[in-house]
């Protein structure tokens, strides 16, 4: 049984069908890449899986239970965490407090939340920044903090929405390392990312959306050669490079 299964997932905003009958599954332990052009419906899929919005139609099952229609906090309790494409730290608080507040959702008391926060901060490599105000961080470290806040809720499934957006080459390499480390620590990951070289490196399998529909699914190698994907998204330039 897959860990996560979405079936015929559909989201309409007025007359716009942002996600149209999309089905895919995520197996425990894998990294699944979710790609496609701007406006393809990727973030909207995350919003529905994480409970930020209800699907118009379709089903979402996590570990054998229906979760569509549940509230975001209920889905978090079940073991799914997500990061936001546009990072949302509490800018006036320290890095440590940002992570600790996230940890409180799964802790029995403040001291346990502190322990979890410290572990996650060490794990994500932002230890030296713990006392800094979140508002002072570079985009690379803000993206890392965003991941740390998600990990602090102790998810089994982590949804990453463009964790490398705006990063420089070195920061992208560090982000790849972190995602692989998270996966090795036993967490299942779904990642949306436009930086193809990085996405291909971390993903076991890739699902491609275009204009709300799933147009392909396969290994990174197969996806990079798929004509429909090249036409809709990757472009001839990518084809030539690979
Ligand atoms: N809350 C909303 N209300 C109305 N329309 C929305 C809403 N959220 C998304 N949309 C629309 O749904 C479509 C899909 O948007 P979505 O954000 O899911 O795309 P995306 O694949 O994540 O794109 P990007 O790569 O640019 O982040 C777009 O046309 C977008 O304008
Ligand atoms: Mg998006």
Image (cartoon, rainbow, N blue to C red):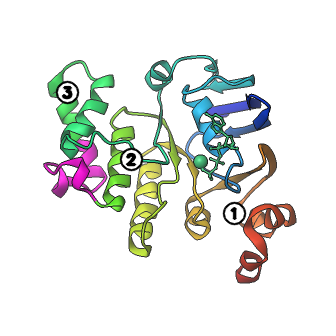
- Please say whether residue 124 is one of the residues in the magenta stretch: yes
Q: Residue 44: in sight, yes or no?
A: yes
Q: Which residues are magenta?
A: 119-137
Looking at the picture, does residue 145 appear above or below residue 221? above
Whichever of callouts 1 and 2 sits on the residue coming sooner in the sequence is: 2
Q: Is residue 84 left or right of residue 10?
A: left
Whichever of callouts 1 and 3 sits on the residue coming sooner in the sequence is: 3
Numbered disc 2: secondary structure: helix
Residue 240 image-quadrant placement: bottom right
Residue 169 image-quadrant placement: bottom left
Residue 76: give x, y in percent of width and height.
45, 26
Say which quadrant the N terminus sits in: top right
Looking at the picture, does residue 68 appear above or below residue 181? above
The residue that mark 3 highlights is 112
The residue that mark 2 highlights is 147
Q: Is residue 162 left or right of residue 12?
A: left
Q: Nearer the viewer, mark 3 or mark 2?
A: 2
**Residue plotted at (33% across, 36% down):** 152
The residue that mark 1 highlights is 220
């Amino acid at each position: 049984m897959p860990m996560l299964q979405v079936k015929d997932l559909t989201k309409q905003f007025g007359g716009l069908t942002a996600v149209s009958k999309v089905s895919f599954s995520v197996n425990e332990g894998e990294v699944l890449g979710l790609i496609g052009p701007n406006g393809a419906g990727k973030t909207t899929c995350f919003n529905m899986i994480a409970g930020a919005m209800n699907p118009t139609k379709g089903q979402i099952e996590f570990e054998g239970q229906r979760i569509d229609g549940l509230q975001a906090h209920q889905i978090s309790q079940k073991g799914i965490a997500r990061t936001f494409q546009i990072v949302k730290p509490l800018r006036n608080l320290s890095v440590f407090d940002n992570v600790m507040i996230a940890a409180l959702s799964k802790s029995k008391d403040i001291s346990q939340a502190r322990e979890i926060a410290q572990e996650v901060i060490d794990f994500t490599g932002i230890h030296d920044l713990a006392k800094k105000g979140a508002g002072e961080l570079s985009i690379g470290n803000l993206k890392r903090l965003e991941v740390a806040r998600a990990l602090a809720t102790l998810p089994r499934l982590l949804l990453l929405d463009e964790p490398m957006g705006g990063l420089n080459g070195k920061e992208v390499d560090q982000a790849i390392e972190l995602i692989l480390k998270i996966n090795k620590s036993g967490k299942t990951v779904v990642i949306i990312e436009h930086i193809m070289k990085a996405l291909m490196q971390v993903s076991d399998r890739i699902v491609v959306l275009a204009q709300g529909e799933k147009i392909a699914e396969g290994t990174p190698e197969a996806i990079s050669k798929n004509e429909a994907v090249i036409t809709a998204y990757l472009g001839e330039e990518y084809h030539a490079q690979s």
